[in-house]
């Protein structure tokens, strides 16, 4: 077949975008009512559908679950054979059917009603059996599918998916769901590590902390820094940190060649040093090290004014990624 594939593909985008615009313009106060119903619910959300609508339903359920709304997916056909047992009286069932007349969806409505759960229809036909039985309707109707045969669900599934995303986004806003909340549901990914990892989980502590006295000699400072291998030494007095010596401080002190070995730790230490509390997020420590005029590679970690650890930028990058 001789035709412009790229331009034809673009018309599919245009058709689906046009459908999305029409569905967007039909969003009504029913979305507000459904969002409030979910927020005030003491039960869970059960999303059900069959075929392509079921596949979209699984994605919507996953999005809602990952953003703080207890949600499960139930295939409508499996609901006819026992899975309706997962629905409780306090639950909200969101049934997806573009036609509103899918046999498997229609067949489970009497049981949903008998259980006492609320029924929300995501359908393109409010006059369908599903539309008439539903307590609330989200209109996802399209004039035609992007499919050249107008048979395969394309525009309708896209609109259903975006309507599900819109509902999830509304709930995120209402709940004031934050990145750290999202991370709780994604602890294994890089985002989870970035938003859940605290400084105390990454810092070097105990015997690994390089420390010296204010009157320690340069020879002692060099030995401690070399042994602990953290690129720094914390200068202490009566269990309180008074200053910090970095490799850069040592290099600058070496410029005073004639007097270098007569110097004490207090002579070359930086007195105005940055610190971070142990319960701060690791990502905060990384930003603190980088977002400054002159970057630093090591931070002392405090717990109520007491030195409890040292964290390096290398450790932070390895732990939480970039």
Image: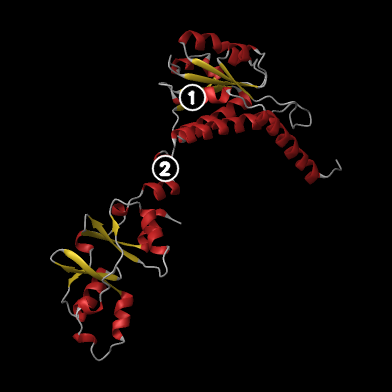
Q: Is residue 135 left or right of residue 65?
A: right
User: Which quadrant holds residue 314?
Assistant: bottom left
Q: Residue 219 location in percent, x, y? A: 20, 81
Contact, CB < 8 Å: mark 1 with mark 2?
no
**Residue toward you, 26 or 189:** 26
User: Which quadrant holds residue 54?
Assistant: top right
Q: Is residue 151 above or below residue 271?
A: above
Asked if one can make out residue 4 in the rendered structure from this viewpoint, the answer is yes
Residue 36 is labelled as: 1
Q: Is residue 300 above or below residue 120?
A: below
Farthest-out residue, left: 238
User: Which quadrant holds residue 311?
Assistant: bottom left
Residue drawn at (31%, 75%) of the image? 247
Asked if one can make out residue 154 in the rendered structure from this viewpoint, the answer is no
Q: CA distance from mark 1 to mark 2?
A: 24 Å
Q: Residue 190 location in percent, x, y? A: 44, 49
Give the quadrant of the N terminus.
top right
Residue drawn at (27%, 89%) of the image? 257
Q: Residue 208 location in percent, x, y? A: 23, 63
Determine which residue is flagged by label 2: 183
The kind of secondary structure element at disc 1 is helix
- Work out whether mark 1 precedes mark 2 in sequence or the reverse, and give the earlier one: 1
Residue drawn at (45%, 19%) of the image? 91
Local crowd at mark 2 within 10 Å, few (<14), some, or many (≥20)? many
């Amino acid at each position: 077949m001789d035709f412009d594939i790229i331009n034809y593909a673009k018309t599919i985008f245009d058709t689906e975008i046009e459908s999305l615009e029409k569905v967007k313009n039909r969003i009504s106060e029913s979305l507000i009512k459904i969002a409030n119903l979910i927020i005030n619910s003491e039960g869970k959300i059960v999303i059900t559908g069959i075929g392509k609508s079921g596949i979209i339903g699984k994605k919507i359920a996953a999005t809602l679950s990952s953003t703080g709304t207890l949600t499960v997916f139930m295939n409508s056909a499996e609901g006819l054979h026992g899975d309706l047992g997962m629905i409780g009286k306090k639950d909200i069932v969101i049934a997806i059917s573009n036609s509103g007349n899918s046999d498997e969806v229609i067949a489970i409505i009497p049981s949903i009603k008998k259980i006492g759960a609320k029924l929300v229809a995501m359908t393109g036909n409010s006059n369908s059996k599903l539309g008439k039985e539903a307590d609330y309707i989200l209109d996802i109707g399209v004039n035609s599918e992007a499919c050249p045969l107008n048979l395969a669900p394309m525009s309708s599934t896209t609109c259903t998916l975006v309507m599900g995303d819109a509902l999830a986004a509304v709930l995120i806003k209402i709940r004031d769901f934050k990145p750290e909340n999202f991370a709780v549901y994604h602890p294994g990914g890089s985002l989870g590590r970035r938003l859940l990892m605290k400084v105390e989980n990454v810092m070097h502590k105990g015997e690994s902390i390089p420390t010296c006295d204010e009157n320690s000699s340069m020879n002692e400072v060099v030995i401690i820094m070399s042994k602990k291998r953290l690129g720094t030494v914390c200068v202490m007095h009566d269990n309180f940190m008074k200053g910090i010596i970095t490799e850069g401080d040592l290099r600058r002190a070496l410029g005073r060649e004639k007097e270098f070995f007569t110097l004490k730790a207090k002579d070359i230490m930086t007195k105005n040093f940055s610190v971070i509390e142990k319960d701060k997020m690791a990502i905060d420590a990384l930003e603190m090290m980088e977002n400054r005029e002159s970057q630093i590679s090591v931070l002392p970690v405090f717990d109520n004014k007491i030195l409890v650890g040292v964290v390096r930028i290398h450790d932070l990058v390895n732990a939480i990624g970039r």
